[in-house]
Image: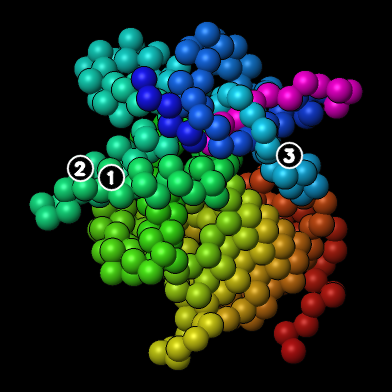
Amino acid sequence: MTSCGCLVLEKVEDHGGGEAAAARGRVKLAPGAGSACGGSCAGAWRSRSEAIFPIYVMGSSRASTVAAARGIVDSAEDPIWEAVKSEAKSEAEKEPILSSFLYASVLSHDCLERALSFVLANRLEDPTLLATQLIDIFNDVMMNNKDICRSIRLDAQAFKDRDPACAQYSWALLYLKGYQSLQSYRIANVLWNQGRKVLALALQSRISEVFAVDIHPAAKIGEGILLDHGTGLVIGETAVVGNWVSLMQGVTLGGTGKEHGDRHPKIGQGALIGAGATILGNINVGEGAMIAAGSLVLKNVPPHSMAVGNPAKVVGYKEKEDPSLTMKHDARRDYFEHVAIRYSDD
């Protein structure tokens, strides 16, 4: 089997840090990564995937998640890909009717990048944009971009950790349109930045048609992102979404008129944006902030605060944990350390 030269990950020995230290992975681009260990360690990853990898875990502090992500260097294994293959084999045995689908989508490939290219191409194809053409484009982008190689794994881990409905890594890859639309955007974003803007816009159109998720390919989105459900999500051209952010269905990061230039929201790291929230204009939602479901945000939101209502107002602060990791959509006043004395509408 031809090696893929893709991003790979490995476990790190515990030197007194316990399970948290063991959870950290390290990554590099290396020949032969796609074939990994030939399946010999699949059982180990299957039985210990939660202890060895994730890079961060639900409810972790900002410091631990960022430190773990920065520690991803120099590896020989890819535990997420090993987990996906193991899960696909198990599911094929349980549901023989899906065996051909699982073989074509996962088991016939030598790395996560190629499997993802196949899945996305077959979701996005149309009569004039063939899957075979899209696979070539997607493979070329993903196999030659370290940022995407890292992001597709951090995003998969985000779905596994934060979405209770995502019981397996393979479910994100194969069935969850939030994950699929996010990775499709990442490809379109690379094409846009390469100057292939017409192709990027064509992909944006297909992504919107197929997944009901409309993300402009020029938008900037970090890694470790959860698009929970994704349906109705709209992210504008100059929007910026930081690392570790979680966005629920129906969220809009939009402009307020037909002005040109920088006109869309900037979402800080670790923020949680609730279902149906609308955030308009070139405003900042601070790190670790939470926007409650259905809120209309027209002004800056301070870091580690919660904004609620139409128009949204800050009701309190929570500085010890990021809501994007805990996924606590909690509007109770006693959830916060402080009532919104520190914030003014002025």
Of badges 1 and 3, the one in the foreground is 1
Q: Estimate the x, y position of residue 324 in percent, counting from the top left.
A: 64, 51
Q: Estimate the x, y position of residue 89 in percent, counting from the top left.
A: 38, 15
| Mark 2 nearby-residue class (10 Å; few <14, some 14–19, many ≥20) | few
Q: Which comes before the other along the chain, label 1 or label 3?
A: 3
Q: Which residues are magenta?
A: 7-17
Q: Amino acid at mark 2?
A: Thr
Q: CA distance from mark 1 to mark 3?
A: 31 Å
Q: Which comes before the other along the chain, label 2 or label 3?
A: 3
Q: CA distance from mark 2 to mark 1?
A: 7 Å
SS of the residue under disc 3: loop
| Residue 220 seen in the current view | yes
- Per the image, the residue denoted by label 1 is 136
Q: CA distance from mark 2 to mark 3?
A: 36 Å
- 321 sits left or right of 8 in the view: right
Q: Amino acid at mark 1?
A: Asp
Q: Quadrant of residue 13?
A: top right
Q: Amino acid at mark 3?
A: Gly
Identity of the residue drawn at 54% across and 46% down: 146
- 316 sits left or right of 109 in the view: right
Query: Image height check: is 147 above or below 341?
Result: above
Q: Estimate the x, y position of residue 200 in percent, counting from the top left.
A: 33, 64
SS of the residue under disc 1: helix
SS of the residue under disc 2: helix
Q: Estimate the x, y position of residue 38 in percent, counting from the top left.
A: 47, 13
- Per the image, the residue denoted by label 3 is 71
Asked if the residue at tag 3 contacts the one at tag 2, i.e. Cβ–Cβ closer than 8 Å, the answer is no
Quarter of the C terminus within the rendering:
bottom right
- Per the image, the residue denoted by label 2 is 132
| Mark 1 nearby-residue class (10 Å; few <14, some 14–19, many ≥20) | some
Camera-side residue of 142 and 174: 142
